[in-house]
Image (cartoon, rainbow, N blue to C red):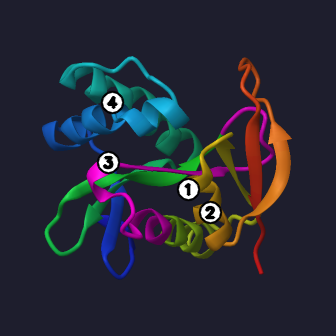
Amino acid sequence: MSLIQTERLQLRLLRDDDGDAAGMLQLLNEPGFHEFIGDRGVRTLEQARDYVRNHTFGSYAANGFGMYAIERRSDGAWLGNAGLVRRDGLPCADVGYALLGAYTGQGYALEAVQGVLAYARGTLGLGELRAIVSQGNARSVALLEKAGFRDDGMVVLPGKDEQLLLFVNTPT
């Protein structure tokens, strides 16, 4: 069942089944994911299944939101994930997204982020939202700006060393 529908996409809760585990395994090992988000050490289907259980299911239970599978409505293709994350060191939820390399550059990430923003505001009643981006990830910066985020400086999250670009999106 989809939580969010856009013109071309549907976003739904992630599952720990073979399909979502295979998609997550591929996504978590994309070169762009490693470069801009980080290596999560997930190398097997079972590790991917555990990653979904431990990270995503916990967020659904604790926060009422999390990362969602992105599927193309026309054929059900699994494109990546997008959603909301609650991180230590940030005052509110932040928007996250990642697509498989084969689906980048086609407007899917922007469409997914816009859907997440509408869901966060309309269904969840959230106000201000944040986003973090690794320095040098110009494509994500451009996407966030198109989605209505504005630069809000830099942040270092607790327990991390990397300075990240911080963006904010407030309701209009």
Does 94 appear in magenta? yes
> Is tag 2's residue or tag 4's residue first in the polypeptide sequence?
4
Q: Residue at x 56, y 74 (%)?
A: 118
Q: For this rendering, which residue is in front, 90 or 101?
A: 101
Q: Which residues are magenta?
A: 87-112
Q: Residue at x 16, y 43 (%)?
A: 19
Disc 3 crowd rating (10 Å Cα; few below 14, some 14-19, many 20+) is many
Circle 4 residue: 29
Contact flag, marks 2 and 3 (Cβ < 8 Å): no
What is the CA distance from the residue labelled 4 to the residue labelled 1?
19 Å
Q: Nearer the viewer, mark 2 or mark 4?
A: 2
Q: Which mark is residue 139?
A: 1
Q: Nearer the viewer, mark 3 or mark 1?
A: 1
> Is tag 4's residue or tag 3's residue first in the polypeptide sequence?
4
Q: Kindly state the secondary structure of the residue where label 1 is placed.
A: helix
Does 120 appear in magenta? no
> Is tag 3's residue or tag 1's residue first in the polypeptide sequence?
3
Image position of 24 with respect to 9: above or below:
above
Residue 37 visible to the viewer? no
> Is tag 4's residue or tag 1's residue first in the polypeptide sequence?
4
Disc 1 crowd rating (10 Å Cα; few below 14, some 14-19, many 20+) is few
